[in-house]
Image: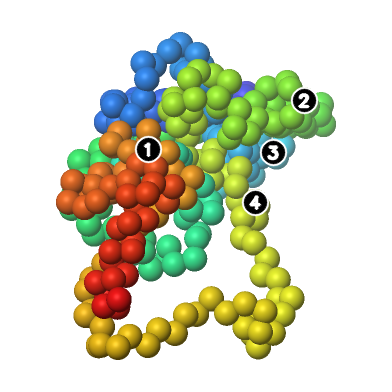
Amino acid sequence: MNNYKNSIVLFLKRFFLIAVIYQFSRILFYLINLKLFETITFQNVTGGLLFDLAAIAYINIIFLIAHLIPGDFKYKPRYQNILKITFYFVNLLFIATNFIDIIYYRFTGRRSTFSMITAKGMEQEALGLIPSFLKEFWYIFVLFLIVSILLWKLIPNLRTHLIHEKTTRKDYYKQFAYFILSLVIILLLGRGGIRKKPIKIVDAAEYGALNNSGLVLNTPFCILKTVFKKEDIDKANYYNEKELISIYNPVISLNPSQPAIKKNVVILILESFGNENVGRGQTPFLDSLITKSYYFKMGLQTEKFQLMLFHLYSLVFQV
């Protein structure tokens, strides 16, 4: 049983190491985006730890099984090497999403989800954004590189000089009991403790100000919680194109008396986007455009906006 207990301790050390890195990435997330959050509270810290443990439990449940499944085969060096390498790369992949969101959060105002990563067109966008991201935010990549090296160096290994002990039937029963108990504990961590329903992304609001929800959450948790969530709307074809045109045709054919003067006019209309969200660092590109263009806080409802549209129409079509 000593070898089995060493295996339990090994998993706990690796689990704790990942938890420390998650906390470190949250500290970076807060310090680099300090202006986007309110003052951090103890409630934010405890909530963040809860969501971190949940994400780490979900990700590493397969490694708990690999570490604690009864049997002497798992003490072999080859098995342990494969287990260590797999543990490293799987966890590093999720840690990387935390580092990417340190910057990406500025543009979206929320933690990335699975749908944001796999959205249509993102496969081309992501490849194009990577070079510019590395160039402009090189310090994030350097920090991630340092963390990835430290993680590999700090991952503990199973003791090389194990005691050659004969495993009895009683030992197998004990190992199986430890195995089941460990599964129950990690499943409880994954669901956020003993509660009626597992914790969800929206539950982050319970641990402090709403503006600090992104600080309480972590990106791996948000990705895992939205993997099987369908956000696409099914396309319904009730009519064919000809029937639709006969009911209502949105295409307007204009025949101006003079050739149109083609001018580059771009109108940006943001639906359900309050003015209080502008100028706070969440919309940097839009903030820069506002200084060089017409900006209407009340949008379509203002008479000034409607007059501007009529003026543009007159210029383009020479009415």
Among numbered discs 2 and 3, the one appearing first in the sequence: 3
In the rendered image, which residue does mark 1 sit on? 275
Among numbered discs 1 and 2, the one appearing first in the sequence: 2
Among numbered discs 4 and 1, the one appearing first in the sequence: 4
Instruction: Please tell me whether mark 1 or mark 3 is closer to you in this view.
Output: 1
Q: Residue at x 73, y 21 (%)?
A: 194
> Horizontal placement of 100 versus 167: left or right?
left
Among numbered discs 2 and 4, the one appearing first in the sequence: 2
Instruction: Please tell me whether mark 2 or mark 3 is closer to you in this view.
Output: 2
In three-dimensional space, the C-alpha distance between marks 4 and 3, rounded to whole angstroms, equals 31 Å
Q: Return the x and y of residue 113 as percentages of the image width and height.
A: 51, 47
**Residue 38 tag number:** none
In the rendered image, which residue does mark 3 sit on? 69
Query: Helix, strand or loop at disc 3?
Result: loop
Q: Residues within 10 Å of mark 1 (few under 14, many from 20)?
A: few
In the rendered image, which residue does mark 2 sit on? 196
The answer to whether any part of residue 12 appears in the image is no
In three-dimensional space, the C-alpha distance between marks 2 and 4, rounded to whole angstroms, equals 21 Å
Q: Return the x and y of residue 74 as percentages of the image width and height.
A: 61, 42
